Image (cartoon, helix red, strand yellow):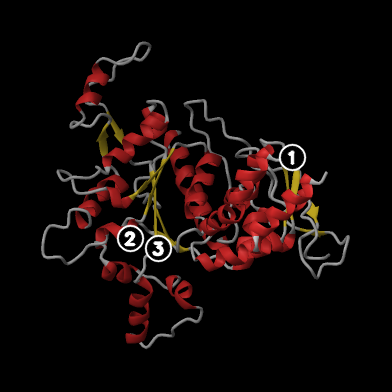
Amino acid sequence: MPSSSLVAESDLGPVSKGPGTISSTLTTTTPITASMPRGRKVPRHVIPEEVPAAAPVDTSSNEFHFNLKPKEVKAHLDRFVIKQDEAKKVLSVALCDHFQHVRMTRAGLKAPFYTKQNVLLLGPTGVGKTHLIRSAAELIGVPFVKADATKFSETGYVGGDVEDLVRDLIRRTGGDVEKAEHGIIYLDEIDKIAGRDSGGRDVSGKGVQTNLLKLMEDADVAVVSPNDIMGQVQAVMPRPGQPPRPPGETINTRHILFIVSGAFAGLPAIIRNRLASAAGTIPPGGEAALMDQAMTADFINFGFEPEFIGRLPVRVACQPLAEKDLFDVMRRSESSLLRQYERAFKAYGITVKWRADGLRQIARLAAAEGTGARGLMTVCERVLRDFKFELPSSSVDEFAVTRELVQDPKSSLATLLKKTSRR
């Protein structure tokens, strides 16, 4: 199949129909490859046939339902995130273990020695860490809050209060405390709160770690912050139709799952020094391979308190995305960026057609950006910026994104407008 051929609609990731559904386009289709003979059919999607589509979760009810299996969770994540198979497996098992525990305890079964399986994701930017967590939260039907750890400081100093994360869960549920108690809190850039030996008070490092400790384990958090005067007034005098909140109402964090992530620049060097000093074998594969060897001692040397890192028992390293992976992100993911551009042009009656050589060139340029899947947006905006500006005011109703267009968008646009003006 020539690499310059058009990418068929069935060769792009299916249009997402929301969590819990799998589009009928996940069947045998023709992959885009120059070496593939014309007409040959091979399985494209990674979801195995024996794994059924997970049933949609009813999020309108206050009842908590969970009957998913790890393979079902991973199958859902495969629809949206390319690569990261090990992270998907680890996350699927951790999520299922945690929410099965929640389900059983709500049914009256006791588990006095259960340890919450909070998750630590390591990996460079743009590899799908946030997308993994958000997709999983949508499938399970629990509220989800994402924040950057860099905005927090120790209580009493300028900056956010970590307890506000729990209150954000309540806001996401419209004030339903019971539902918020089963949510997921995702903290990115957790490596930025590693302790620093500055000689003074480390209010945004070890201080934040200390405050997070109690939340990640089992703590009662005031629904309304004692420092929030407006919130206190609204609790006593709520909006019409809303009942007043009981004084001193709290939310318990026992069943809130914490997932943290970070790039951890500098950690591979710490791991390499540990392996070298212990006469261990340095794994081939660069920093990504070293991240797989990370141990608790490495995180402590990086600047984390032993008590803090001990509350993150589930750890997995995400792998960087190569050029081929970025090509697959555009072509196979249900949340493909290409759909966004199709919708943007379609609003003006313009159809975009994608050619395999054009997508490969976009992937090549995005890989050079070094920001993972985020580089795809950078390249696409740079390439298609003038098209988005000029074409809505022209008579053009269709164009194809080819390698030539990606390499020289201005000349391609000029040629396209010239051809159209002659009609």
Vertical side of 206 occupied by 168: above or below: above
**Residue most extreme to the bottom:** 279
Assess whether mark 1 and mark 2 are in contact (beta carbons under 8 angstroms).
Answer: no
What percent of the width, then of the height, locates residue 105? 42, 38
Q: Secondary structure at mark 1?
A: loop
Residue 206 relative to residue 252: left or right: left
The count of marks equals 3
**Residue most extreme to the left:** 200
Amino acid type for the residue under numbered disc 1: Ser
Nearer the observer, disc 2 or disc 1? 1
Residue located beneath label 3 in the image: 263
Amino acid type for the residue under numbered disc 2: Asp
Spatial distance from mark 3 to mark 2, Cα to Cα? 7 Å
Q: Residue at x 77, y 60 (%)?
A: 31
Q: Residue at x 27, y 44 (%)?
A: 162
What percent of the width, then of the height, locates residue 357? 72, 63
Residue 313 relative to residue 77: left or right: left
Vertical side of 274 occupied by 317: above or below: above
The answer to which quarter of the image holds residue 202 is bottom left
Residue located beneath label 2 in the image: 191
Q: Which sits earlier in the primary sequence, circle 2 or circle 1? A: 2
Q: Which sits earlier in the primary sequence, circle 1 or circle 3? A: 3
Vertical side of 228 occupied by 289: above or below: below
Residue located beneath label 1 in the image: 395
Nearer the observer, disc 1 or disc 3? 1
Q: Is residue 47 visible?
A: no
